[in-house]
Amino acid sequence: MKNAKEIKEFFDENGYYFARGVFSPQAIREMESEFDRIVSHNTARNDNSNRKWVGDNKDLLAARADSVIVHTHQLQSYSARWLQAVLDPGFLDVVEAILGPDIILHHTKLLQKPAEKGAPFPMHQDWSYFPSVNNTMLGGSIHVTRATDDMGCLRVYPGSHRLGRTTGTNGQEASAFMEKNYPLSGAKVIEAEAGDVLFFHYFTVHGSMPNTSKNTRKNVLVQLHSGNDRIEGDNHHINSRLVLRGFNNIATRSYVEA
C-alpha cells in the first residue's frame, strides 16, 4: 500500500484509490459470517431487501427481468462486528490520508448480487443522494468476497470527480450526457479480492454490470465525510453522525440530537 502522501495524491488526481488487503482473511471470514446473518435475519422477517435499480435508465443494461440486489443500510446497527470493521485502523488510515484526521460515518450499506441474476447499476454520481456542504463525502467499498468482471464488480471513470455536481447523473433517469461521455462499457474495471477496498469520491462516476457468474458477490459500501463537513439542509436520512476518528468540529447539541 502507498504511504499517506501518495494515497492523497492519487485520490486527488483520479477520484478513487484502490487499497488491497485492508482486511485480513480472518477478519473477512468474521465479517462475511455477520453479513450473511444480517441477510438471513431480514429474509426471515420478510423484509423487502431487493433494491435493484429502477427508473428510466434501468433497461439500458439488459438485465434479467428477475434480477436482484439485496440491500440493507446501517450494518453497525445490526452487528457489533461491522462496527468494529468501520473502526479498523487499516481502513481508517486510508480514509485519514484522503480526508484528514476527523472522520464521520454517514452510513453503511450491504449490497449482495446473487449468482447469475445480480442486478447492475448504471453509471452515476452519488452526490445528489446525500449532498454535503464541503463535498468531502467519499465511499469505501469493502469487498467481502472476490469481485470479478463477470460478477458485476465496480467500474469507475478516473478523473470524473472533476465534473463536480452535474445534473442528470443520479443513474435513475436516462441521460444523453452520460450515455455519450460515460458509458458503462468504457469505464475502468476494478476486479478485487476479499479484503480489498475501493475508495471513491461521491462525484466520481461509477457503476457495475450484472452478475452473470455462478458466484455471489458481496460488498459493503461505507460513506464517510470530514469532521469539518455536514449534510446539507435537513437531509438527515440514514445519517449516523458517528465519529470514527478525531472530532466532529461542526457538532452542536441540536445537530447531534436531530
Image (tube, rainbow, N blue to C red):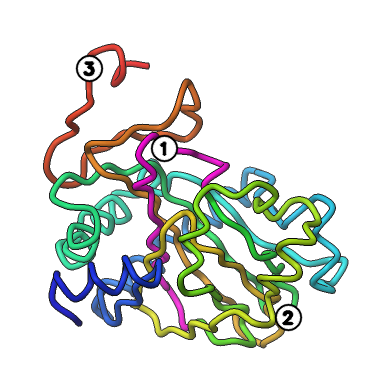
Query: How many numbered marks appear?
Result: 3
Asked whether, in this view, residue 6 is left or right of residue 167, the answer is left
Of marks 1 and 2, the one in the foreground: 1
Indicate which disc residue 149 carries: none
The residue indicated by pointer 2 is 116
Quarter occupied by the C terminus: top left
Q: Earlier in the sequence, mark 3 or mark 2?
A: 2
Alpha carbon distance from label 3 to label 1: 17 Å
Q: What residue occupies the far top of the structure in this picture?
A: 254
Span highlighted in magenta in the image? 127-146
Alpha carbon distance from label 1 to label 2: 36 Å
**Residue lying at 40% horizontally and 60% vertically, measured from the top left:** 34
9 or 120, which is in the foreground? 9
Indicate which disc residue 252 carries: 3
Amino acid beneath label 3 = Thr
Q: Is residue 139 above or below residue 134?
A: below
Amino acid beneath label 2 = Glu
Q: Is residue 31 above or below residue 38?
A: below
Amino acid beneath label 1 = Ser
The residue indicated by pointer 1 is 132
Question: Circle 3: is it few (<14), some (14-19), or many (20+) Cα within 10 Å?
Answer: few
